[in-house]
Image (spheres, rainbow, N blue to C red):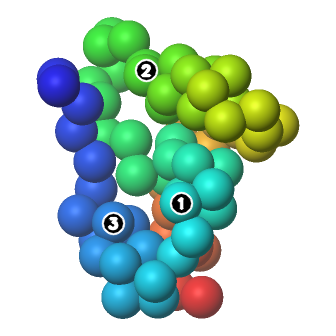
Amino acid sequence: MGVRFRHEVCEKWISEETQVEKVLEDLALASFDPEFFPSYHDQVIRIYNQKFGKKIPIRSKRKYDLIFNFLNK
């Protein structure tokens, strides 16, 4: 797919049995794309919302401190 995710974030979602819509809300936390590569998480959320009639917000959370806080909750 050309998308890279942080394993620690994905493992936490799996171990906590996080619902898919919560994962999509926080998808940017897992995004590990290099600086100049396009980000796909916004597009994934838009498609999901359109297909399932949902209104999951698109958030941009790629900052390291937010990721660190999430992993240490």
* Residue 16, placed above or below residue 66: below
Q: Helix, strand, or loop for circle 2? A: loop
What residue is disc 2 on?
A: 39
Under tag 1, what secondary structure? helix
Q: Residues within 10 Å of mark 3 (few under 14, many from 20)?
A: some
Q: Is residue 28 visible?
A: yes
Q: CA distance from mark 2 to mark 3?
A: 17 Å
**Which residue is tagged 3?**
10
Kind of residue at disc 1: Val
3D distance between C-alphas at marks 1 and 2: 19 Å
Residue depicted at 23% across the width and 64% down the height: 7
Confirm or deny contact between disc 3 and disc 1 (CB under 8 A). no
| Residue at the disc numbered 1 | 20
Residue at disc 3, secondary structure: helix
Instruction: Indicate the quadrant containing the N terminus: top left, top right, bottom left or bottom right.
Output: top left
Q: Residue at x 29, y 76 (%)?
A: 11
Q: Residues within 10 Å of mark 1 (few under 14, many from 20)?
A: few
Q: Position of residue 29 (x, y in %)?
A: 50, 52
Q: Quadrant of residue 47?
A: top right
Specify which label sits upstream in the sequence, 3 or 1.
Answer: 3
| Relative to 39, 32 lies left or right | left
Amino acid at the residue labelled 3:
Cys
In this picture, is 1 found above or below 60? above
